[in-house]
Amino acid sequence: MPVLFVEYPKCSTCKKAKKWLDDHAIEYVDRHIVEDNPTADELASWRERSGLPVRRFFNTSGMRYRELGVKAKLDAGMSDEDAFALLATDGMLVKRPIVVTDDAVLVGFREAEWEQTLLP
């Protein structure tokens, strides 16, 4: 069954991740993070399945993250629900790539983590 690959096509990390998937013959469904941004419910589900903190789902190096002062909002105690609602407003706020399988959710491209999770 193909995995869901959520990416921004112009992102160099996403390009490396896509090449890695292709090189390892892993089938995936490609989803453009700006044209089809994850919903708050999807993000909440993925966060729960990944076990990662909400902060890991933010693209902390992005302009929108800085423009909106998201770090200060998170530091001030923004709720998970509010964080997911904010992430759902703009795909450029979301860390990428995201890979969703039946068993795991991977955020960002860490080759060793991907090998451990996605290869038999």
Image (cartoon, grey):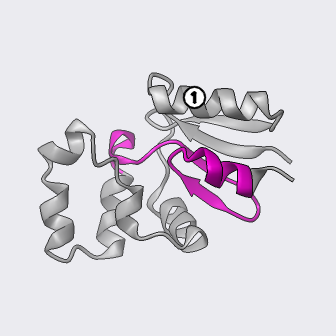
Q: Residue at x 56, y 64 (%)?
A: 46
The x and y percentages for residue 19 are: 66, 26
- Categorize mark 1 by other alpha carbons within 10 Å: few (<14), some (14-19), many (20+): some
Q: Position of residue 102 (x, y in %)?
A: 76, 61
33 and 74: which is toward the camera: 74
The region drawn magenta spans 89-116
Who's the residue at 13% across and 74% down the image?
76
Q: For the residue marked with disc 1, what is the amino acid?
A: Lys
- Please give left or right for residue 101 compared with residue 45 in the image: right
Which image quarter: residue 49? Answer: bottom right
Q: Is residue 70 magenta?
A: no
Q: Is residue 73 above or below residue 11?
A: below
For the residue pair 113 and 10, the one nearer the viewer reads as 113
Residue at 33% over, 46% down: 93
Which of the 4 image quadrants contains residue 117? Answer: bottom right
Horizontal and vertical percent for residue 26?
80, 38
Q: Residue at x 35, y 73 (%)?
A: 81
Q: How many marks?
A: 1
Q: Is residue 4 above or below residue 55?
A: above
* Up-down relation of residue 119 to residue 20 (above or below): below
In the image, residue 72 above or below residue 119: below
In the shown orientation, is residue 76 left or right of residue 85? left
User: Pointer 1: what residue?
Assistant: 16
Q: Is residue 109 on the magenta stretch?
A: yes
5 to the left or right of 13: right
Nearest to the observer: residue 82 or residue 4: 4
Q: At numbered mark 1, what does the secondary structure look like: helix, strand or loop?
A: helix
